[in-house]
Image (cartoon, rainbow, N blue to C red):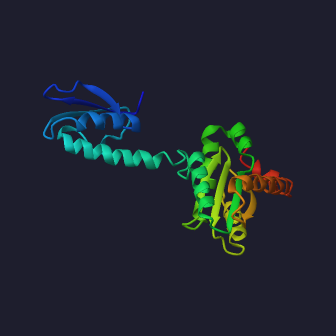
Amino acid sequence: MDAVRTVIMIRNGSMAEQKYSIDKEFELEDLRKQLSALPEKNGIRILICEEDDRRATLELKGDITRDELLRFLDERRKVLHVSSQKDELTGVLNHDYFEKRLQTIDRSEVLPVAIINFNINDWKFVNDHFGDEESDRLIRMICDVIVGESKPYFVIGRMDGDVFGVLIPRASEREAELYIESVKDSLSNIEDRILAPSVAAGLVTKTSIYEKIEDLMSDAEYNMFDDKYRIKNAPGYRERLEHGL
């Protein structure tokens, strides 16, 4: 069941009582089309049926005009459109929208573009030993650092469960290398009772308009695996990883 449903009823009977989810863009569009065909001054009774505490954020209840409801629907659709671009757990770009952004950067012929693959070290270990809640917390913790150490023009997306991609258009000399170092340093300084956050990173740079970022991503991933091997075989790594057991 949807967490929030709107139930509308047109008082003059020209529109039957129906339920629409405010979390589904196609339902809002269908409702908007029906409302647009009604007279401007039609009165509408809005009821909110919900399972959580979101009522206060809706600002939509009681008797309102058709145009008031249409304005609400337009604003809600904007919110849904933005949220459709975001990864639900972390708030960075989701996989699909990250790919759209990299294609846009390719078409713009911006150079150079630094391409970074961040992979969470031993995410499965955390999931196996501490469960979903802690493994999700690890993802959020690491994402917060990746975002926090970035600059506003960096493009950051969650490409897979434990993988983040970062694009730096017009990257200056050593900008990407310094960014990776700052992410790793910040993670190594986190003290947590259970988690020992760290990432492996792979970097490549697009230097020709004839190269495709999507093709270079595999090179970044390959470099990331080299980095992961070095990190996981470094002295003290295992002890830090298992300190929460």
- Residue 80 lies, in percent from the top left, at 42, 45
Q: Residue sitting at 14 percent across and 36 percent down?
A: 42
- Residue 195 lies, in percent from the top left, at 68, 50
Q: Is residue 163 left or right of residue 222?
A: left
- Tell which residue pokes out farthest to the bottom in this image: 173
- Residue 60 lies in quadrant: top left
Q: Is residue 61 left or right of residue 163?
A: left
Q: Is residue 124 left or right of residue 99?
A: right
Q: Residue sitting at 63 percent across and 59 percent down?
A: 106
Which quadrant does the N terminus fall into? top left
> Does 65 sit above or below residue 181?
above
| Along the viewing direction, whichever of 150 and 82 lies nearer the viewer | 82
> Does 146 sit above or below residue 91?
below
Residue 31 seen in the figure:
yes
Which quadrant does the C terminus fall into? top right
| Along the viewing direction, whichever of 124 and 16 lies nearer the viewer | 16
Q: Is residue 233 left or right of residue 75?
A: right
Residue 24 seen in the figure:
no
- Residue 75 lies, in percent from the top left, at 33, 48
- Residue 200 lies, in percent from the top left, at 75, 56
- Residue 30 lies in quadrant: top left
| Along the viewing direction, whichever of 93 and 52 lies nearer the viewer | 93
Q: Residue sitting at 68 percent across and 69 percent down?
A: 112
Q: Residue sitting at 62 percent across and 67 percent down?
A: 110
- Residue 20 lies in quadrant: top left
- Tell which residue pokes out farthest to the front in this image: 210
